[in-house]
Image (cartoon, grey):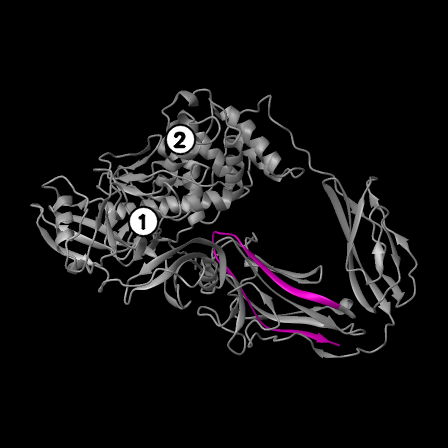
C-alpha cells in the first residue's frame, strides 16, 4: 500500500501582542501592558496580573498575549506564551477563557511549577545539534536550534533542535530537547503526524490528508504546500478542530467536503511534481485556497481561489476530477500566456482533472481512473457532466469544426477532451474504460496518460495569449518531438489523435524523422591465454560514420580503442567473459555481444568458498555500506531466514536505497557465482511499465535489473556467474529507485558470493 504520511506543523498566531512581567509568586506584576477597558483582552491582562500563582509565575517570567479566538457561543480564548529571563519557555503557554460578559471562567496552564533555572549553557549549539541528529536514522538538515527553558515536568535549560530526515523508512521533522547542562535528551516531538478524515467521495475511509496543528488545535491548512487550505465559503475561515480527525462521511457536511477537497488538491500537487515536474500549483512552490460551501450547482476558479458548490441533492461536489479541473485553471493562469479562453480553457481543466484521478488511482467504488467528468458528483441528477472519451454522449461535439470555438465554453471542450483520451488511451477499450471513436475511422494507439500529460504540459509552457485548437496541435507536436528527440512514436500518436478529431494540419506543424539504426558487426567468440597478448581485432559498424567505441565485460588487461574499435591487450585472469561492444555516433548507437574465453591463470580456484561478510544481515549492517534504515527487522516484511534482511524502497515517494560490499574474488575462481534471495511486492498495477526498479552491479557491470513488473509472493533465488572477476576486488551493489506514486518494496536476504 502507499505509505502516505501527513505533516502537522504547529504555528502560533502572533499578531498584536501584550507583554506582562511577573514580579513574584504572590506579587502583582508591574509594567503590565494594558488593553482597552471592558474588552476580553483587558479581562485577561487583569487576571494574569492578579493571579501569578495560578500560572506558576516566577519573578523572571514575561508573557506575550496572542490574538483572541472567539466563538459564536460567546466564549473567548486568549492564548499566552511565556519567556524566562528572555528565553522562550516550551510548555509555559496558557489560555485564559472568558464568557460573553468578559468574566474569566477558567485558565488552562501547561506547566505545573514556577521556573528557577540557570540560563548559561555548558553545551554549545553545535554539540546539541550533533546529539539531536543522532535521534534520526538519516538527517537531511537542521532546521532550527535555539536555547529555551523546557517547563514540562521539572524545568530545564535546554536546546530545542529541529532536525529533518528519516526515522527508519519514515519521514520525520523531530524537535529534540537536549539538556543544555548535561547533554541528556529530555524529550522529542515529531511534527510528522497522520491527519485523517472521513470523505464522501474519496476512499477507502479514513483517507489521509495533510493538516496543521498539534495538541488540541488543528486546522485544514496544508503545512508543506504553501497556500493550500480549505475554508468555509461562509465567513472564509480555515476549518479548525480540536483533533486531527475530520469529516463524518456525509456529503452535505462542510468538513467532509473539505476532506475530499484537500485530498484532491494534495494529490494533484503530488501529480504535478511526480509526473510533470512542476513545483506546486503556481509553478513556484505555492498554491491557492479552496472554499467549500458555495450555494450554487457549480464550482469555479476566480483567479486566486477555488470555490466548490453542491449538486441537486445538496452534497458538495469536491471530487478528484472537479477539484483537479478547477486547479487546472490555476495552472493555466500561471503558465506562459496566462488564462486560456473558451473551450481550450475548459479542456485544460478536464485534462488536469483526469491526470489527478489517474495519478491517485483510487479503487472502486470510489473515484476510479476514467475519462468521465463529474461521474461521482451527479451534479444535476443525470450522471457525468462530460464524457471525454466520447463527448457526444452528453451532447457535445466529438469532432472539431470551425463552429466549435463559438460554442458554449464547456461544449467547446469536447474535441480537445477527445484528442487527449485518444492520445493517452487510444481508440480501443482499455483497463475497463470504453473505446473512443474516431472521426476519420482510424485506429489510434495510445501512449499512456502520464506521457500524454507530459506532452500537453510542455506544450502549455510554450503557450501564448489566444491559444486555439490549431495552435495547440502545433504546440503538442513540438513538445512530443522535443521530449523524445529522434524517436517518433509519441509524435506520431499525438498527430494521429489530432487527425482523428478533425483538427487539420497547420503550416507550422513540425515533422519527425526517426534516428538511423547502427549495426555493429559481430566478431564471433574469442579466446586467449593468461599472460599472452591476444591477436587484436577491430569491430566495424554501419552505416559509415565516425563512432565512439565502448565495451563492458572485457577480461582484465584487454581494452578497446575508443576511436578505432580495435580490441587488444594481454589477459590478466582466466575465465569466460560476456562482452558487449557499443558504437555511438551522435544520437545513434548500436551494440553486439560475444564471449571471450581466457585459459590459464593458475589452474584451480585458489581459495574456494563463500566470500561475503554477514551475508544474511543477521549482524545488522556489519560488512555492508547501506542507506540508513535499510538493514534490520521491520514490520511489514519478513526475512527469508533468520530475522533480519535488507528492505529497499517501499515509500511510495521518490526515493533511492542501496546496499553494497567490496569483496575479493580469488584468482582462478572462474566458476564463481553471486546469489541472493529477492522478494518484490508493489502497489503498482501496470503490467508493462517499469516505474520502480533495483539494479544489481558487480564492479561497473550490471548483472541484473528487477522492477515492479517482477512482483511475486515470497522470495525467489537468483544466481549469476561472476567468474570473469576472478583475481579482482569488486563491489557488489544493489541500488533501488522508486518514483513517488505507488510503493514497490525490494527485499534482499541470504546473499552469497561462492568462489569456485
Image location (x, y in percent) of residue 568: 88, 56
The disc at residue 354 is: none
Magenta span has 588?
no
Give the alpha-carbon distance from disc 2 to disc 1, as whole Å: 37 Å
Image location (x, y in percent) of residue 144: 42, 53
User: Element type at marker 1?
Assistant: loop
Quarter of the picture holding the C terminus:
bottom right
26 with respect to 468 (left or right): left
Image location (x, y in percent) of residue 489: 62, 39
The label nearer to you, 2 versus 1, is 1
Quarter of the picture holding the N terminus:
bottom left
Q: Dot 2: within a 10 Å radius of its alpha carbon, few (fewer than 14), some, or many (20 or more) residues? A: many
Q: Which residues are magenta?
A: 729-756
User: Element type at marker 2?
Assistant: helix
Q: Which picture quadrant has residue 323?
A: top left
The residue where tag 1 is placed is 11
Whether residue 191 is visible here, answered yes or no, is: no
| Towards the viewer: 24 or 580 | 24
Q: Is residue 229 above or below residue 104?
A: above
The residue where tag 2 is placed is 346
Return the disc, 2 or 1, that comes first in the chain's sequence.
Answer: 1
Magenta span has 732?
yes
Chief SS of the magenta region: strand
Amino acid at each position: 500500500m502507499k505509505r502516505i504520511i501527513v505533516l502537522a506543523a504547529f504555528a502560533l498566531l502572533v499578531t498584536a501582542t501584550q507583554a506582562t512581567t511577573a514580579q513574584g509568586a504572590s506579587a502583582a506584576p508591574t509594567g503590565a501592558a494594558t488593553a482597552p477597558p471592558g474588552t476580553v483582552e483587558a479581562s485577561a491582562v487583569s487576571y494574569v496580573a492578579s493571579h501569578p500563582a495560578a500560572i506558576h509565575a516566577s519573578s523572571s517570567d514575561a508573557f506575550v498575549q496572542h490574538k483572541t479566538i472567539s466563538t459564536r457561543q460567546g466564549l473567548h480564548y486568549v492564548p499566552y506564551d511565556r519567556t524566562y529571563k528572555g528565553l522562550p519557555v516550551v510548555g509555559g503557554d496558557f489560555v485564559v477563557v472568558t464568557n460573553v460578559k468578559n468574566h474569566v471562567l477558567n485558565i488552562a496552564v501547561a506547566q505545573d511549577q514556577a521556573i528557577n533555572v540557570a540560563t548559561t549553557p555548558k553545551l554549545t549549539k553545535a554539540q546539541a545539534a550533533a546529539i539531536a541528529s543522532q535521534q534520526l536514522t538519516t538527517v537531511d538538515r537542521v532546521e532550527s536550534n535555539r536555547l529555551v527553558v523546557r517547563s514540562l515536568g521539572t524545568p530545564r535549560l535546554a536546546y530545542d533542535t529541529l532536525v529533518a530526515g528519516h526515522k527508519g523508512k519514515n519521514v520525520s521533522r523531530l524537535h529534540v530537547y537536549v539538556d543544555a547542562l548535561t547533554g541528556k535528551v529530555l524529550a522529542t516531538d515529531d511534527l510528522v503526524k497522520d491527519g485523517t478524515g472521513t470523505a464522501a467521495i474519496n476512499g477507502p475511509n479514513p483517507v489521509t490528508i495533510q493538516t496543521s496543528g498539534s495538541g488540541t488545535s488543528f486546522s485544514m491548512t496544508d503545512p508543506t504546500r504553501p497556500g493550500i487550505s480549505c475554508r468555509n465559503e461562509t465567513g472564509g475561515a480555515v476549518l479548525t478542530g480540536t483533533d486531527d480527525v475530520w469529516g463524518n462521511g456525509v456529503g452535505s457536511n462542510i468538513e467532509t467536503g473539505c476532506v475530499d477537497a484537500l485530498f484532491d488538491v494534495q494529490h494533484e500537487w503530488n501529480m504535478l511534481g511526480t509526473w510533470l515536474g512542476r513545483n506546486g500549483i503556481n509553478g513556484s512552490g505555492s498554491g491557492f485556497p479552496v472554499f467549500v460551501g458555495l450555494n450554487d450547482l457549480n464550482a469555479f476558479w476566480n483567479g486566486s481561489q477555488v470555490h466548490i458548490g453542491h449538486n441537486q441533492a445538496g452534497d458538495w461536489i469536491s471530487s478528484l476530477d472537479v477539484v483537479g479541473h478547477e486547479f487546472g485553471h490555476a495552472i493555466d493562469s500561471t503558465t506562459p500566456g496566462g488564462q486560456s479562453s473558451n473551450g481550450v480553457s475548459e479542456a485544460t481543466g478536464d485534462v488536469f482533472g483526469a491526470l489527478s484521478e489517474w495519478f491517485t488511482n483510487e479503487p472502486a467504488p470510489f473515484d476510479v481512473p476514467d475519462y468521465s467528468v463529474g461521474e461521482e458528483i451527479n451534479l444535476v441528477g443525470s450522471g457525468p457532466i462530460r464524457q471525454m472519451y466520447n463527448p457526444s454522449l452528453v451532447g457535445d461535439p466529438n469532432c472539431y469544426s470551425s463552429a466549435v470555438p463559438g460554442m458554449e465554453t464547456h461544449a467547446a471542450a469536447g474535441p480537445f477532451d477527445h484528442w487527449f483520451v485518444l492520445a493517452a488511451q487510444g481508440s480501443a477499450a482499455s483497463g475497463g474504460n470504453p473505446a473512443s471513436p474516431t472521426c476519420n475511422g482510424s485506429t489510434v494507439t495510445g501512449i499512456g496518460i502520464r506521457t500524454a500529460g507530459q506532452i500537453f504540459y510542455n506544450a502549455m509552457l510554450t503557450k501564448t495569449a489566444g491559444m486555439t485548437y490549431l495552435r495547440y496541435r502545433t504546440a503538442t507536436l513540438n513538445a512530443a518531438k522535443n521530449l523524445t528527440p529522434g524517436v517518433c512514436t509519441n509524435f506520431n500518436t499525438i498527430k494521429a489523435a489530432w487527425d482523428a478529431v478533425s483538427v487539420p494540419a497547420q503550416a507550422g506543424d513540425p515533422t519527425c524523422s526517426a534516428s538511423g539504426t547502427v549495426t555493429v558487426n559481430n566478431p564471433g567468440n574469442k579466446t586467449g591465454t593468461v599472460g599472452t597478448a591476444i591477436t587484436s581485432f577491430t569491430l566495424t559498424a554501419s552505416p559509415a560514420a565516425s563512432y565512439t567505441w565502448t565495451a563492458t565485460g572485457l577480461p582484465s588487461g584487454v581494452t578497446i580503442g575508443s576511436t578505432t574499435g580495435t580490441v587488444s591487450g594481454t589477459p590478466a585472469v582466466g575465465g569466460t567473459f560476456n562482452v558487449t561492444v557499443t558504437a555511438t555516433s551522435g544520437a545513434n548507437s548500436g551494440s553486439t555481444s560475444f564471449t571471450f574465453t581466457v585459459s590459464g591463470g593458475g589452474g584451480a580456484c585458489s581459495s574456494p568458498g563463500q566470500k561475503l561478510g554477514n551475508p544474511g544481515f543477521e549482524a545488522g549492517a556489519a560488512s555492508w555500506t547501506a542507506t540508513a534504515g535499510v538493514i534490520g527487522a521491520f514490520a511489514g516484511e519478513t526475512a527469508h531466514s533468520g530475522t533480519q534482511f535488507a528492505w529497499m524502497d517501499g515509500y511510495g515517494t521518490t526515493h533511492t536505497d542501496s546496499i553494497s560490499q567490496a569483496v575479493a574474488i580469488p584468482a582462478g575462481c572462474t566458476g564463481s557465482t553471486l546469489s541472493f534471495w529477492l522478494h518484490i511486492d508493489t502497489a503498482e498495477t501496470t503490467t508493462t511499465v517499469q516505474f520502480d526498479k533495483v539494479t544489481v552491479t558487480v564492479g561497473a557491470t550490471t548483472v541484473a535489473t528487477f522492477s515492479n513488473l517482477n512482483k511475486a509472493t515470497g522470495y525467489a533465488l537468483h544466481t549469476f556467474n561472476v567468474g570473469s572477476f576472478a583475481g579482482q576486488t569488486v563491489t557488489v551493489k544493489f541500488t533501488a529507485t522508486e518514483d513517488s506514486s505507488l510503493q514497490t518494496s525490494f527485499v534482499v536476504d541470504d546473499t552469497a558470493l561462492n568462489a569456485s
